[in-house]
Image (cartoon, helix red, strand yellow):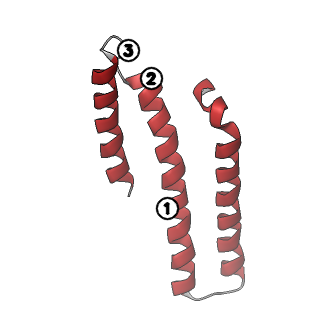
Amino acid sequence: MSHTIREKTKLINRTRRIRGQIEAVERMLEDEKSCAELLQVIAGVRGAINGLMSEIIEDHILLHVADADLAQNDRNEGAAELIDVMRAYLK
């Protein structure tokens, strides 16, 4: 995943925030918090994971999937369309 190096710090920080959210879920379970509270935090974790995955997939599409032989505009349009579909799926 050498293409992620340019955003390595950003991705690591996102991962650390997700780790904090997971640790919060663990603490809530240990403290026997209500289901509603737990579900709200778990939904936040799921959103954070989906956001991270979306970012990684978007970079992968732009750098590895889009056809480099196409004209730049055609390549950008095709990649943008695939990214839009992926984002809609991950919501």
Q: Nearer the viewer, residue 28 or 17?
A: 17
Give the class, few, some or many, for how many residues have Cα within 10 Å of label 1's Cα (few <14, many ≥20).
some
Q: Nearer the viewer, residue 37 or 10?
A: 10
Across and down, in percent, residue 52 comes to 54, 49
Above or below, 74 relative to 61: above
First reached walking from the N terminus: tag 3 or tag 1: 1
Identity of the residue drawn at 32% across and 44% down = 84
- The mark closer to the camera, 2 or 3, is 3
The amino acid type of the residue labelled 3 equals Ala
Q: Which residue is mark 2?
A: 64
Q: Where, by quadrant of the figure, is residue 75 drawn?
A: top left
Q: Which residue is mark 1?
A: 47
Tell me the element at label 3. Answer: loop
In contact (CB < 8 Å): disc 3 and disc 1? no
- Residue at the image position 30 percent from the left and 23 percent from the top: 73
Between the C-alphas of marks 2 and 1, the distance is 25 Å
Q: Amino acid at mark 2?
A: His
Q: Which mark is residue 68?
A: 3
Q: Secondary structure at mark 2?
A: helix
Q: Nearer the viewer, mark 3 or mark 1?
A: 3
Name the amino acid type tagged 1: Gly
In x, y percent, where is residue 25?
64, 72
Measure the C-alpha gap from mark 3 to mark 1: 32 Å
Location of residue 47 with respect to 86 vertically, above or below: below
| Residue at x 30%, y 15% (from the top left corner) | 71
Q: Position of residue 49 (x, y in %)?
A: 54, 55
Left or right: where 19 falls relative to 41: right
